[in-house]
Image: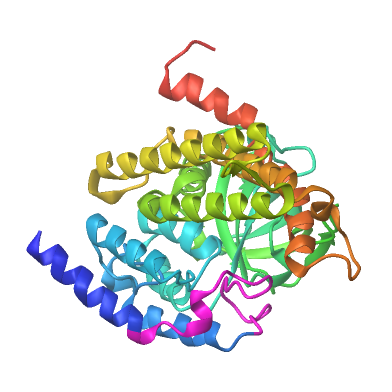
Amino acid sequence: MAALDDFRKDTRAWLDENCPASMRTPMTEGETVSGGSKHRSPNPDSYVWLDRMAEKGWTVPAWPKEYGGGGLHTDEFVVLLEEMARIQARSPLEGMGVTMIGPTLLEYGSEEQKQRHLTKIVNGEIRWCQGYSEPGAGSDLAGLATKAEDKGDHFLVNGSKIWTSGAQFADWIFCLVRTEPQAPKHEGISFVLFSMDSPGISIKPIKLISGASPFCETFFDDVKAPKEDLVHKVNQGWTVAKRLLQHERSGLRALASAGASRTAATQTTTSLADVAKETIGMVDNHLANPVLRDSIIQYRMNANAFSLTQRRTVEESEAGSTPGAATSIFKFYGADLRKEQLELQLKARGTQSFGWEGDGFTAEELNLTRTWLASRAGSIAGGTNEVQLNILAKRVLGLPD
């Protein structure tokens, strides 16, 4: 414990000295850093913070040092996240590079692939997007039709993907393609990487009801995918694809940050209560609306229980690795918990939470409207609630088909 106490002391001192003041404030729309140069944060401090954390290996604290990570043990990782939460420090780097493809390459990538891609992810040099869903293969992902023909030293990719998050800003894509059309659908799929600047790629952003365009349609016309970036083995990409989804749904970063999540839940609940006090008023030192008061308390209890479950999971996992099929629990419940929190925001703010434009609404209120609308997709994106329940039934509970 003494060593961990020393680590906390050193970490606290380093963060206090090196985290810029503007990086200790709630994230502003557009300032999130996900890597690459096609979408830049307007705040220069975002990159000061990124560079300082990357130099420490703390953009990916649990990755091995030989690939640019911090090499922290799980308990040290938890301490780092707790100390960041203490000063409300923003995450220096987000995106699919650190949460999805990076951890997957650590498990399934060749040494050459790790050396070539991981350091660029750590430093925020490249941004990644995901080529999974297709117009006819969403929940039935293994029904994908995008094909890749073997041309010797490369595959020739033709087809399309949809709901490709951030494709318009991405430098690289990890993509599921069909390499053996005659094989059973789960067995004829390969997992390939290629540059989004390759000839033959076209991108069409999809405008959502929230007014934003986080998703895109992505089209491939005779796109060359080098064989050197085939991950794992040809026709065995489904194994890689499933593991990546487990990282997406509940990677070590998310699980280990349960302590920070409890702090965030407390802050969110406090914010909800403060808003409700102003808009609804108090009676006998209690919120005037007893139904809303009980709902806020229940949300806080649920959020704390959820983060405690996350924390227990990371403590039970072997060598700090992402758990298996049980991660569907976190995807399923986390999506509903987020929607619950935003619904309470709406109830607390009343009609002020439905503004779209105009001087009658604050920037926070206008952002809430759009965030609430976007959250409705949470139970669909990344695997529907129904799919998560099927996974839990079959692979965790062992129920028959």
Considering depth in this image, is 12 or 120 the residue closer to the camera?
Answer: 12
Residue drawn at the location 28% of the way across and 66% of the way down: 64
Indicate whether 168 appears above or below 150: below
Name the spot of residue 231 as percent of width and height, x first. 47, 55
Can residue 184 be seen in this snapshot?
A: no
Name the spot of residue 23 as percent of width and height, x first. 50, 78
Quarter of the rendering occupied by the N terminus: bottom left
Considering depth in this image, is 234 or 12 the residue closer to the camera?
Answer: 12
Name the spot of residue 241 as percent of width and height, x first. 52, 45
Indicate whether 48 appears above or below 53: below
> Quick check: 339 left or right of 190?
right
* Residue closest to the far right: 358
Quarter of the rendering occupied by the C terminus: top right
Residue drawn at the location 45% of the way across and 72% of the way down: 89
Name the spot of residue 386 as percent of width and height, x first. 64, 27
Query: What range is drawn magenta here?
Result: 17-42
* Residue closest to the far top: 400
Is residue 219 part of the magenta span, yes or no? Answer: no
> Picture quarter containing residue 388?
top right
Considering depth in this image, is 199 or 83 the residue closer to the camera?
Answer: 83
Residue drawn at the location 89% of the way across and 65% of the way down: 357
Considering depth in this image, is 282 or 233 the residue closer to the camera?
Answer: 282
* Model colouring: rainbow
> Picture quarter containing residue 28?
bottom right
Q: Main secondary structure of the magenta part?
A: loop
> Quick check: 339 left or right of 355?
left
Is residue 21 part of the magenta span, yes or no? Answer: yes
Residue drawn at the location 49% of the way across and 25% of the way down: 392
Can residue 291 be seen in this snapshot?
A: yes
